[in-house]
Amino acid sequence: MSVLSQSGGARRRKTLRRNGSRVGLWICLAVVLLAAAGGAAVVWTYSGVRLVADASALGRVERQPFAGSLVSVRASGPDGRAIPLVVSHGRLTPRIPVAAGERISLSVVVRRPSWESWALGAMRRETLVVRTPVAKIASQWVSVGRGAHAEVRFDAPIARVSLAGAAVSGRTVTLPTRTSAGSVALRVAARAWERLGAPVRVTWFPQSSRPVVLASPGPNARANPLAPIRLTFSAPVASVLGGKKPTVVPAVNGQWSALDDHTLVFRPSGTGLRFDSELAVRFPSALVVAGPTGADAHTTTSLRLSVAPASFLRLQQLLAQEGYLPLAWTPAGADVQRTARSELAAAVAPPAGGFQWGYPNIPPELKALWKAGQPNEITRGAVMMFEDDHHLGVDGIAGPKVWYALLADATAGKRRTAGYSYVYVHRNVPQLLTLWHDGRIVLTSPGNTGVPAAPTALGTWPVFEHIPAGTMSGTNPDGTHYDDPGIRWISYFHGGDALHAFNRASYGTPQSLGCVELPLETAAKVWPYTPIGTLVTIEN
């Protein structure tokens, strides 16, 4: 029994040992599997790659320890163009400047380690679409205390600015202002690798308890006839003017327009502001009015301006251009455009150029009369001729009506084609009249000038009255009166002195009472060449 009992126990012990070995094996296998799963989980957890936004770069690649190696990094613009990148510490920065607000697509490819690629794949791709930052200005109109610099604030930090001397601190740009007021175009970039953005005009004003308006032209400045009047207010126009518009006095054709909620512009129309005049721009209430840089700042209800006078040199240029002078004018550069605005601007600021005599064989007497840019009888006669041609009052003065007619002809390209005539009379015996026209002497004829008691005055004068026949009356040297009707071919040039026909037994000696008497046939030939404005010179 005892033997039998020992044999059964041994068998049981062997069976238990086999079962224990199997359990241990399964436990070991389970541990191995759990360890493998844990390792796989660790590898999976720490093999990630992410593309994320970055505060200073286009984006950032975040790679975990088992992520593998970076194969490629690409960036492309909205049109598909490639943007080269610099990769540093995972940050992706453009090699070339890109525009603010531009939509850019980023893509990275990572090669996983070979021992994990069988399970997770050899490559991993990540993409990210970003928009480059745009720094927007908080206010374009800023007030500046005395001695301080203008500070411009943006809604994002600034990396670069276009203005030399400007200081950048976070979201604030301090301008290198040297005047109490002014305006500047500013371009900024929120990132060093961005191109500078579109220009934004910033205007600064001196601090004041009243609204400030910067006027261009400034107070008491001289304006061109068609130059716009620009008013920039330190506060919105609607609040400063209460919904009203400034008033131009005296009234001028033109229109006010708003460029933005701080800026009004008056644009004259038609012939614009009258040459050499004064005007005022009146406001509903008192403001601080200053020039564009803050100069001449004062509290007032009106901006006072003067309008520039027309240039005498430009008057001569136009008279030459339109065929009223014996000279031609050639611009040094491009000629003035044939528009009302261009011609009005040139009337105040004439272009550079030169005058040349337009004909050969110019009489020395005529040459001696010419002075460019200065009043002279040649110019006076040309103005009178122009006035007569345009049915204006003939006084030889280039007033507004003459100027507007001149400018209208210049714009239309009109030109007088009758040529240029000049008459000169030698008073020494034998007395002779010479008629010159367009470079040649048309005729020379004896004529009679005034007797010693009523001599014909020496000098040069333009013809001011031109009639085919009339009555000439006056007082003889002995005090008696004369009244001669039916005098033919009369051209008055100085007071009562005239070129005209008069029947005499001879010609070439002093016989008249101051006129230049000619034979009837000669006077008939001379008269068509001596319209109003023709110069007559009496010389010894």
Image (cartoon, rainbow, N blue to C red):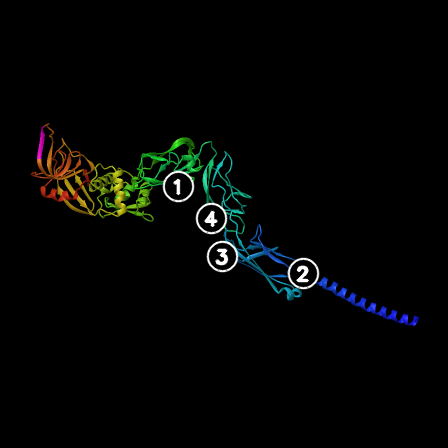
Task: Say if residue 341 shows up in the picture.
Answer: yes
Choose top left, top right, bottom left or bottom right for residue 108: bottom right
Indicate the secondary structure of the residue bearing disc 2.
Answer: helix
Mark 2 Cα shell of 10 Å, populated few (<14), some (14-19), many (≥20):
some
Point out residue 77 in the picture as x, y percentages from the top left corner: 50, 57
Whichever of callouts 2 and 4 sits on the residue coming sooner in the sequence is 2
Q: According to the image, label 1 marks what residue? A: 258
Q: Amino acid at mark 1?
A: Ala
Tell whether position 311 is magenta. no
Q: Which mark is residue 111?
A: none
Task: Say if residue 46 shows up in the picture.
Answer: no
Q: Amino acid at mark 2?
A: Val
Q: According to the image, label 3 marks what residue? A: 78
Q: Nearer the viewer, residue 393 or 425?
A: 393
Q: According to the image, label 4 marks what residue? A: 198
Q: Alpha-carbon distance for marks 3 and 4?
A: 19 Å
Point out residue 246 in the picture as x, y percentages from the top left corner: 37, 35
Whichever of callouts 3 and 2 sits on the residue coming sooner in the sequence is 2
